[in-house]
Amino acid sequence: MFLQTIVNGLLLGALYAIVGMGLSIVFGTMRIVNFAHGQFVMAGMYITYTLFTAFGLDPYVSALVSFVLCFLLGMAVYRVAIHRIIRGPEMNHILLTAGIGLMLTNLAQMVYNTNQLTINLSYSHRDLVFGGLRINIAYLISFLIAAVVAALLFWFIMKTETGRAIRAISQNAAAAALSGIHVTRVTMLAFGLGIAVAGVAGTLLLPIHYVDPSVGDAFSLLAFIIVVLGGMGSILGSAIGGLLIGVIAQLASYYLGQSYSDVLTYVVFLLVLLFKPSGLLGRSRV
């Protein structure tokens, strides 16, 4: 059962990693902590739910639709609001993104009410057996798609011209501008990409999780824990942090009980901050 619990934790942690990676992109590029990140995850969940109930579209097929729609939504939010306060004090960042989160929550309440919604798939309760290990099919598909998304995201950031521009801006925006990089355009793209990844995370979570207008708050807190744990602005750190949180949560739930799962997660989070304040893969900033 120990090995089964570890496997379950990795399957869940991969989804958590995608949630954190979207926030990491935004913070790493613009030094903005997006307090509406969980609400964008919620938006991806509602997009998937609507496509499933209205058109019968499988949620794993609709991941691409969620990516595109949330990317456009993120670009619009940046253009309308974020770029106006990007050079302002941190309090402005907090108030604006928190306000955007409240708007998305209230909009979801107006459209979908406050009911907890979920989708039932024909294979969501089926398991595959490998050497005595039981792996839920829905979890496995979500894990594989999350792994592909993470790999593509890492390749995009590290190997493409736009990715190098994003990394240049994250290191020194003024120097990047002097080298010919269109900072506003690239930061808008980075913000849209972070929101798109959050939308995909919502799509992958919906087959195994309910959605309601308040679920965004829980995912915002989870994303902050993962990003800080892995290292602010480190995409690879967010991936490791998400996997670690997933394994810890499953081990605590099995051996100590569900009520201790969150407690142990916060304890590990505080211990990491105590002994390595910059996170597992983060670097201290002067």
Image: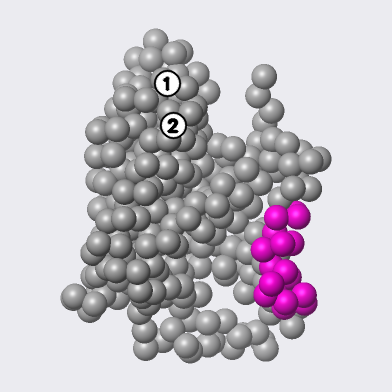
Residue 35 placed where, x, y %?
46, 43
Q: Earlier in the sequence, mark 2 or mark 1?
A: 1
Q: Is residue 163 left or right of residue 258?
A: left
> Circle 1 sits on which residue?
88
262 in magenta? yes
Identify the image quadrant of the N terminus: bottom right
Is there a contact, CB below 8 Å, between mark 2 and mark 1?
yes
Q: Residue at x 24, y 77 (%)?
A: 53
Q: Which mark is residue 93?
A: 2
Residue 263 in view: yes
Residue 27 placed where, x, y %?
49, 35
Identify the image quadrant of the C terminus: top right
Q: Toward the viewer: 186 or 251?
A: 251
Q: Is residue 89 left or right of residue 129?
A: left
Q: Residue at x 37, y 42 (%)?
A: 99
Q: Is residue 202 left or right of residue 110?
A: right
Please state which amino acid type lies under the numbered disc 2: His
Q: Which mark is residue 286?
A: none
Principal SS element in the magenta part?
helix
Say how many tags the image has. 2
Circle 2: is it few (<14), some (14-19), or many (20+) Cα within 10 Å? many
Q: Residue at x 65, y 84 (%)?
A: 133
- Which residues are drawn in magenta? 252-268
Q: Residue at x 66, y 46 (%)?
A: 229
Q: Secondary structure at mark 2?
A: helix
